[in-house]
Amino acid sequence: MTLPKPTELIDRLAEQIRPTLTPDCALVGIHTGGVWVMEALARRLDSDLPCGSLDIAFYRDDFSRIGLHPIVKPSQIDFDTEGRRLLLIDDVLYTGRTVRAAMNQLFDYGRPATIRLAVLVDRGGRELPICPDFSGYKLEIADDQHVSLVKHDDGSLGFVRGANRI
Amino acid sequence: MSANLQLNDDGSLRHLLSLDGLPARILTQILDTAAGFLSVSEQEVKKVPLLRGKAIFNLFFEPSTRTRTTFEIAAKRLSADVVNLNIGASSQSKGETLLDTVANLSAMHADMFIVRHSSAGAAHLIARNVADHIRVMNAGDGRHAHPTQGLLDMFTIRHYKGGFHNLRIAIVGDILHSRVARSQINALTTLGCPELRVVAPKTLLPHDVEGMGVHVYHRLEEGIKDVDVVMMLRLQNERMQGALLPSPQEYYKYWGLTPEKLRLAKPDAIVMHPGPMNRGVEIDSDVADGRQSVILPQVTFGIAVRMAVMSILAGN
Amino acid sequence: MKIHIKNGRLIDPKNGIDAQQDIYIAAGHIVGLGQAPADFHANRVIDAAGLVVCPGLVDLSARLREPGFEYMATLESEMRAAAAGGVTSLACPPDTDPPLDEPGLVEMLKFRAKSMPGPRVYPVGALTWKLRGERITEMAELHEAGCLAFSQADTPIVDTQVLMRAMEYAATFGFPVWLRPRDGHLVKDGVAHDGAVAARLGLPPIPVVSETIALASIILLAKTTGARVHVCRLSSAEAIDMVRRAKAEGLPISCDINVHHLHLTELDVADFNPNCHLYPPFRSQRDRDAIRAAVADGTIDAICSDHAPVDDDAKELPFQEAEPGATGVELLLPLTLRWAQEQGRPLSQAVDLITRRPAELLGIDTGQLGLGAPADLCLFDPETWWQVTRKSLHSLGKNSPFLGMEVQGQVRYTIIDGHIDFERHHNH
């Protein structure tokens, strides 16, 4: 099964999200792919909504197993999250553990009014009761396969697929 | 040498005992990770769940409330359980040996020891004798090393200067007795600082200090000329008068950092100090509180750096 | 007991022998060389093929830790260790508790030592009362009790006038004075050579001038007092040069080194190994090389073990808090042999430095295998390698910088006063 191009999916996502936006919304991307998607979305939505980014390395549930992620980027939430409607954005939704970690982290910044989840690709395989509010594409894929978003040297986005790295 | 004790077989950091012998990639990894932790302090809940359930013991054989607090805050922001022990006052005076104390605490299921001791090599001794899963962090051993202070200083320099490769840096003061200076020198030489100077009277310099890769200056006016970074050291009270130095007044006159002397450095030079400061002895208040001082940011960065080291050690 | 040692390589530097020759022992003396005396019927024949047969080792400094420090080691354990190291005579410094400053203490120690197997023990008398450097001891009385020399062990006399008078008084009787050159003010809390390693590790330094300044005083006082001075445990190239010059001027001065200083340098303390905490400290490679050369050219008269067994509680501490010293009687031979091999010196010179020459300095008639000499011998296998481990060391002190390492040259028999006091079976 071939995946559509990321730009197409981002267009689709933007159309789904646009009607739901209100001035008290803010976008939050999860490092690294989610931040790229968020930036592309923000351009298409042409909005002045505040944007932030999360590196969930400190909130992962597998720290005791695999230790600290070798590259940790600072999280940047430069706006007050208290009472805001947050749109959490990631590239690929799989087990749901990343989203769980991101939500925990968001709550450490304050108490948002709502959190909704937008993902470029939903590949199934959930291990937690989490489902996206907006999804660009639903992908059927075997457990031993992985799919992820990459950024090419020219700045364009693409998908890579292959056998599981682990 | 000491490097082996600090590293796992795969080259990752196991204990942090000294910056001597640590490769640049590990120093950089710690600084990068610390940058990530800096944002945690901006959260409303200044805490991440990374070390939840881990027991960190502050083993302070030499009392220092200030340093202990910085480690305690770092550990708590990582959600670890922290136990503070000022051992100088209890076990040691009852004749219990250092290793007995450590064995006892290990039996209480410690995961990490933060060790401060008045003798060089104490943290090494403990690291050599703990169970496999326990990590040791040196919080200052005699005149030997204070690696987290050295790292937070590197973080500060990188933060304000962007890197190390084009910098001229002067360390001023009591190099001889300073574990901070040794850690700074080790880190700066590893990270590629091209010109590192030490400035002090002969009585406050170790012999063969040049062997550590520094240029020696005795006059502050010369040593500070055109530098990008001035790192001041604390002068201990007991060393201000005696055979090492005649008086705090004379020290201030010749080695104290005043606004006039600071003008000899580059206009954008930053001034650092590990604290606590002796105002009017090694540093003038106008410099300490002045526009070029980054002494308070150092303290902030110190928490992030200690969080970074703790989480890297706990995860390796 | 009559012993016939056959097929061994006999090395007796004093009598210029280095050849395969049998040796015959009876009634505690050497009664035949090469040929058996008439009517000699051996109770025991030792086949020494492949072994070196030499005089028993004479160690100028071995602490037996009695009286007073039995928690570190005992007379019995250290005498056994010395025998296992091939040592048949040893001088023990007066830094016991109480120090050896009274004839009664010396007699008691000699009596206790005589009652058990092991080397002949020669207590060195304290030069001053309690080693405090204030009041000189009853040297003549101590000499009658068995002290052949007088020293301050590791504690220098601070008051130079007292030092001068102690030397004058000893010179009155012709007693040798053994002194460690150490300026206490310059050593203070120092624990490591004042060089690159101490600078890096932040260890309180011991400068070379702490040795040379004290040595200069000793040499000048030796000239004015006429005392027979032996300088103990030199560690620096500068100090060795000073002794070389003093000897060239005709001063009757002698000196020794700790065998560890032939091999180790400041770099060996770089991982804070408390077993490398010795006094004097291991110095630079240049100093180590100067020591090796001075042993070869005879400036250094003797090599000793400076045996100092220390219990784990006093050693398993941060470097600067650890009790200084290394266990050494069992390493004196292999470490001296290693020097000879690395420097390309003959085996007989190595043997000389740990037998005849220290015996002469101590003024005893062992350290040689002439006809009629006391039957103190060491038989060792120069080829065998063995590992220094907590188990392989007989000393109660396991504090060796060489722990875990392999050394070459293993003692097989130690014969003291005609008795086999130590015998190692093949596969040990």
Image (spheres, coloured by chain):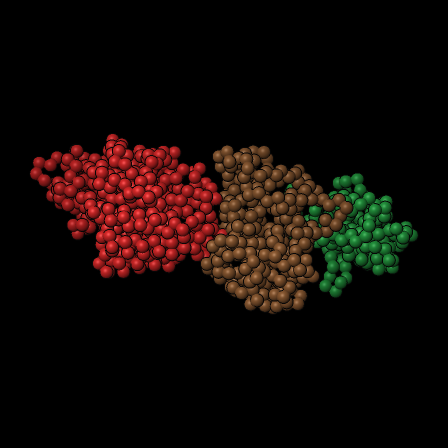
Residue C418: where, in percent of width, then height?
19, 37
Asked whether, in this view, residue C331 is left or right of residue C372, the answer is right
Place residue C367 in its image quadrant: top left
**Looking at the image, can residue C427 be seen?**
no
Residue at image point 44% right, 43% down: C322
Asked whether, in this view, residue B257 is left or right of residue C126, the answer is right
Q: Is residue C307 above or below residue B286?
A: above
Q: Is residue B266 above or below residue A65?
A: below
Residue at image point 11% right, 43% down: C35
Residue C369: where, in percent of width, then height?
17, 45
Residue at image point 51% right, 60% down: B201
Residue furthest left in the image: C38
Residue furthest right in the image: A19
Q: Is residue B82 above or below residue C198?
A: above
Q: Colour of chain A?
A: green
Place residue B35 in its image quadrant: bottom right
Asked whether, in this view, residue C423 is left or right of residue A18, the answer is left
Asked whether, in this view, residue A133 is left or right of residue C427, the answer is right
| Image quadrant in which the C terminus of chain C is located | top left
Nearer to me, A52 or B200:
B200
Residue at image point 68% right, 55% down: B297
Task: Please give the letter of the chain rendered in red.
Answer: C
Nearer to me, B26 or A17:
B26
Q: Colour of chain B?
A: brown
